[in-house]
Amino acid sequence: MTFPIAYTCPEVQTEVRGHLGCITLNRPRAFNALSLPMIRALAAALLAWREDPQVQAVAIRGMGKEGAFGAFCAGGDIRFFHQAVLRGDAELEDFFTEEYALNHLIHHYPKPYIAFMDGVVMGGGMGISQGAKLRIVTPRTKMAMPETNIGLFPDVGGGWFLARCPRHGGEWLALTSEVIGAGDALALQLADVCFDAARIGEAWDALAGLASFDAASLQAWQQGYGAAAPAAELPLDTISRCFEQPDVLHIVQALEKESGEWAAGTVKALRTHSPLMLEVTLQQIRRGAEMSLADELRLERDMVRHCFNMRHQDRYMTATDTMEGIRALVIDKDRAPKWSPSRLEEVTPVMVDGFFASPWPAHAHPLRELA
């Protein structure tokens, strides 16, 4: 995938401090939700710094409403998705192609890439942080893959990195859209270290002052700012037992046999989200466990095309569960989506399998260049 050679955007601030390329996402009112210009600016900076011998490492953070940090990235610009579909804007296709190529670039970046995942880290924010050499959370971190809540699936490589969480925890996170803190992020291996939120600005400045970014230097640096993470709260034994089932309907039935408020609340969440997209999501993650990142991202690119053009069901634009979910949760905010089908019991394998058929031959796939 080729990117623009140079691309600037006021919502992505870049500078080189010493030997560190510094990126600040600067769209605080939208919790730094990613637009297409932001994706292009990120890719342009990373490609330029990849070839720059002065830059030995890259660090990324988000701007909060009260200054640097406090929010990382809330994901993709969902309102743009809705508007683009309604007006037939081809930039929607560009958005996903270029976002997934950016995710791949980050995962395979040859220099240390360090993500300061302070505050909100959701959806697309996970896509630009999970490939980092060092993933830093704080007690303020609020992490989620909330796509099934709006009738989508956990993209940006989610089918690859969630499949590698221990004990079916990634499947739980994807299917429920629940928000977790630093302790559970560490337990699910979606973060590497917890920093003191009060000293995170100091840590950022100290990182820029390092003379080198070898493993020993980074280890010594991070030890100076570590903090005890909040205790992990997830009942991983229950998750492992219930989420190993072959499909979401059987997961729900297993949860219904469990006692306690946690299991009941999980059943309620699963009964609220799009039944079709829940089953699609589970199959995505199960397939992703056996795939390379590049192949999984190509699969996601196929899937997201079907989300807005469900040709195998003759459902398009506003008739899709994805557009209905965005309408109900983000546009009209009535929180009453009308899913089709409306119940897990009505989802058939044919409905699900259609999402995994590529609309393109291999030689013409938008992400064919990913290695």
Image (cartoon, helix red, strand yellow):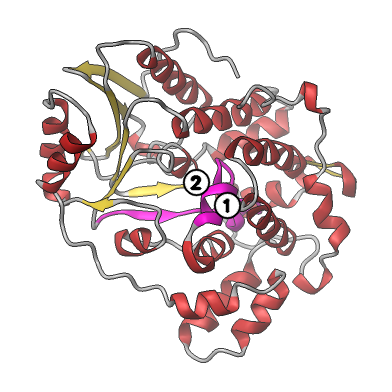
Q: Which mark is residue 147?
A: 1
Q: What amino acid type is highlighted by mark number 2? A: Gly
Where residue 268 sits in the image (x, y, percent)? 58, 76
State which quarter of the image contains the N terminus.
Answer: top right
**Residue drawn at x 30%, y 19% as measured from the top left:** 14
Of 333 and 171, the residue lying toward us: 171
- Report how far apart the C-alphas of labels 1 and 2 lie in the structure: 7 Å
Residue at the farthest top position: 5
Position of 248 compared to 331: left or right?
Answer: right
Residue 320: horizontal and vertical position, in percent?
A: 77, 48
Q: Is residue 221 left or right of residue 324?
A: left
Say what secondary structure mark 1 lies in.
helix
Residue 52 occupies which quadrant of the picture? top left
* 1 or 2: tag closer to the N-terminus: 2
| Magenta part of the chain | 140-164
Q: Is residue 301 visible?
A: yes
User: Is 55 within the magenta?
Assistant: no
Indicate the secondary structure of the residue bearing disc 2: loop
Residue 150 drawn in magenta: yes
Q: Name the residue: 79% across, 22% down.
A: 363
What's the amino acid at mark 1? Glu
Marks 1 and 2 close (CB-CB < 8 Å): yes
Q: Which residue is mark 2?
A: 123
